[in-house]
Image (cartoon, helix red, strand yellow):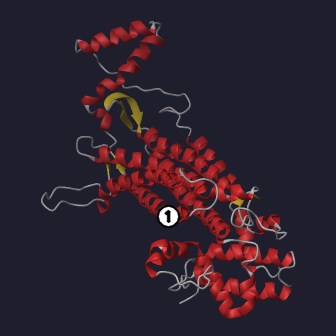
Amino acid sequence: MARKLWEKDTAVDHDVELYTVGRDREMDLMLAPYDVLGSIAHVTMLQSIGLLNQNEKQVIIQELRNIYHSAVNGDFVIEEGVEDVHSQVEFILTRKLGDIGKKIHSGRSRNDQVAVDLKLFIRSRIETVTAAVKSLFDALQCQSELHKDVIIPGYTHLQVAMPSSFGLWFGAYAESLVDDLTMLLSAYRISNRNPLGSAAGYGSSFPLDREMTTRLLGFDSMNYNVVYAQMGRGKTERIVSQALSSIAATVGKLAFDACLFNSQNFGFIKLPDEFTTGSSIMPHKKNPDVFELTRAKCNKLQALPVEITLITSNLPSGYFRDLQLIKENFLPAFDEIESILAMVTRMVEGMKVNTHIADDDRYKMMYSVETVNKLVLNGTPFRDAYLKVGRDIEHGDFVPEKDINHTHPGSIGNLCTDRIHALMERTIAEFNFDAYHKAFDTLINGKDI
């Protein structure tokens, strides 16, 4: 069994080890490629300040690159008795390179290692989430334009209120996703700062070149204060999870609407048959299980920031083992939201809309405001027009006028689809994912770093 990095002469109690390690090995496999990237940057920096010679640097980096490819290909394992990914990488290096492998931990702690691993992981996964959001956004905008002239009732208090349209309905969720990505962009900027070199949260007596590792890892800047670099653990995850929960809130609301609109009492949309399920007793049923599960999954994601807050809220400054537990639901949250977005995108693309909803007399009252407005345009004071139409409705004399002429920006007749699209494109461009891709490519493929 491998010796712990911190282990001395006292044996570790087996039950204590199981309890303290928990699911950390499982979670750390997600971090393995990023741990290696952080180590390549750190080793490069150690050579620049004289703690490694050029030959040692080259030998270590070559082996780290081998480990990186193993991790990316799914071949990397954390062996029995090894606590975490950081220990496993160091043990592999020591097995292959002997004493040279023992030198890479100079000037760092597992505390700043996991902090940098998490930030590199978050940065990459935010990119994949952004792409998934953009796919759903495109599907919503396509449906919005395709059905922009199909009138549906809008509701307040779940009562028929005023005319809306499928153009507005689909388009509303598209624009909501832009705001969600704006939140994700803020979370990305907070994640895109380098904690490496903060060690256990109090720096190091070695003359570490933190500017170099910041540049090598493609960060925008560093977490300057070493105490804050450690305090950012947990806070970063909470902020990112809040951004993910905002996306989940938008998609969950869309799922609720879709379940409602798909029901026979509404009949506004028809979901693709292949995305519905049947009943074991009622042969006519086509249940919207995908959207129902989506709604529940989105609710779970919205609970994640609260969970992280509860883990971290009573911790003072400095590192505590409590933070380890955040990984267990935070890291898988990215797979969950991407799965949700991919499925909902397919659902939206396959949705069929009822183009004759407004022909139903039960919706005729939604035109009352249109009638009031026409009276006002012909010179009747608004309050008088309102009273007249209200009395006509009470007495059963109201005859709806279904000619709708909305022209102001964002209305039925002017969806501003192109402006919303431009806003989304500008937001995505601000992430500047290419910057970290270039840094990663240099770390893995560069001949001299």
Of residues 342 and 207, the one nearer the viewer is 207
Q: Position of residue 289 (x, y in %)?
A: 29, 57
> Residue at point 73% right, 64% down?
198
Q: Is residue 81 visible?
A: yes
- The amino acid type, in three-letter code, at marker 1 is Leu
**Number of numbered callouts drawn:** 1
Seen in the picture, residue 404 relative to 144 is either above or below; the reply is above
Residue ranking furthest to the left: 281
In this view, the residue in front, 66 or 88, is 88
Pick the residue in front: 5 or 42.
5
**Where does residue 181 sit, x and y in percent of width and height?**
58, 50
- Image quarter hosting the C terminus: bottom right
Rendered residue at 50%/32% (across/down): 411
Q: Position of residue 230 (x, y in %)?
A: 66, 59
Residue 111, position as x, y percentages in the image: 64, 67
Furthest residue in direction front, as rendered: 10
Asked which secondary structure carries label 1, the reply is helix
Q: Residue at x 36, y 36 (%)?
A: 152
- Is residue 66 depicted above or below 367 in this figure? below
Mark 1: few, some, or many residues within 10 Å (few <14, many ≥20)?
Answer: some
Question: Is 280 positioned to the left or the right of 427 in the image?
Answer: left
Q: Which residue is mark 1?
A: 325
Give the camera-side residue of 231 and 25: 231
41 sits to left or right of 415: right
Q: Is residue 442 visible?
A: no
Q: Give the quarter of the image for residue 291.
A: bottom left
Q: Is residue 103 left or right of residue 374?
A: right
Q: Residue at coordinates 82% horizontally, 71% vertically from top-left?
A: 206
